[in-house]
Amino acid sequence: MPTAPTIDAAPPARKVILTCVQPTGNLHLGNYLGAVQNWRRMQDDFECYFGVVDMHAITLPIEPAKLRAATFELVAWYIASGLDPAKAHFFVQSHITGHAELAWVLGCLCPVGQLERMTQYKDKVAKHESVGAGVLYYPVLMAADILIYNAHTVPVGQDQKQHLELARDLAEKFNRHYSPTFNVPEPFIEKTGARIASLASPEKKMSKSDEDPSGTLFLNDPPATLRKKIMSAVTDSGSEVVAREDKPGVTNLLQILSACTGRAIPALEAEFAGKGYGAFKSAVADAVVGTLEPVQKKYAELIANKDHLLEIIKTGDEAAQKTAYKTLAKVYRKVGFLERAR
């Protein structure tokens, strides 16, 4: 372990929130409305760490050049979407000494059977897909990502709750086996805009990995593409613009329009009463294009200046490394590792 810098022993004045995203594809409107805008509102009240978890990205095949480019792109989209490097720490996982090291310690406390019960691993095995050890082990690395910063709260979607439960379990197990060391992180389940559905299959969540790209509104889609996807979105029988369980397509579009305009769904239902789907979809398209236009403009400025992005990453890395060193030194001492001579 490298020599740690001098660290102020005082605890942070604010609670720590950590959230991480793999650089494996473009962000989409569901990410923007359902997650990033919630994170933006947290910046003033919490110590926020926003990680690009490139080590997780290699659990599946990815071209090295693509991974490097996607890392830059994700940081640029973070900032263009309203996350402020003056208020939060942006770091790249592979730059920080501590994630993999803590994952090894935690892995020694984690039964293999617990990992084999993880949904994504089980799904791949059930499909008889070739599974590398990283696919089995990455939930432990995810736990380390959280615990290395002693996060109090982790914003998660429903599909990640199982992984956070593992992090909580490992934190409690370490605290019992050695002594109180880690916060037991609490989930923050986003409510506002948390479930933006696919335009093509509104029974499914909007996803960057959807086999039908027409169902996903990517942040880098040109305005014409956004409009085409929205105008082609699956609707429902009848012509009423109402949010109802039997009208998932229209309900999804109403949720998007509400999130983009800040207007309540009942008011939108009243506005489009008797107007049919054409006018309604056109209004949704206008709102989405208007919402993403400044984001896309800011992104273009940021991605054109890689040196500026590198400085932001460097500053965030330094803050993250300072915290990681402190946590890792404490863990190493408690498990009995001999301190390195300095």
Image: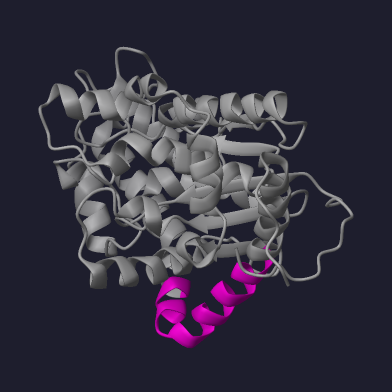
As drawn, which residue projects farthest toward the left? 128
Residue 122 figure quarter: top left
- Relative to the observer, which residue lies in front, 226 or 91? 91
Magenta residues, as a range? 298-319
Residue 311 figure quarter: bottom right
The x, y position of residue 65, in whole percent, is 25, 73
Q: Quadrant of the C terminus?
A: bottom right
- Image position of 27 with respect to 216: above or below: below
- Relative to the observer, which residue lies in front, 225 or 111? 111
Residue 336 figure quarter: top right
Residue at screen point 67% across, 61% down: 88
The x, y position of residue 10, in whole percent, is 89, 54
Residue at screen point 72% across, 41% down: 334
Query: Magenta stretch: dominant SS?
Result: helix
146 inside magenta stretch: no
Regarding residue 329, the answer to whether it shows in the image is yes
- Relative to the observer, which residue lies in front, 109 or 81? 109
302 inside magenta stretch: yes
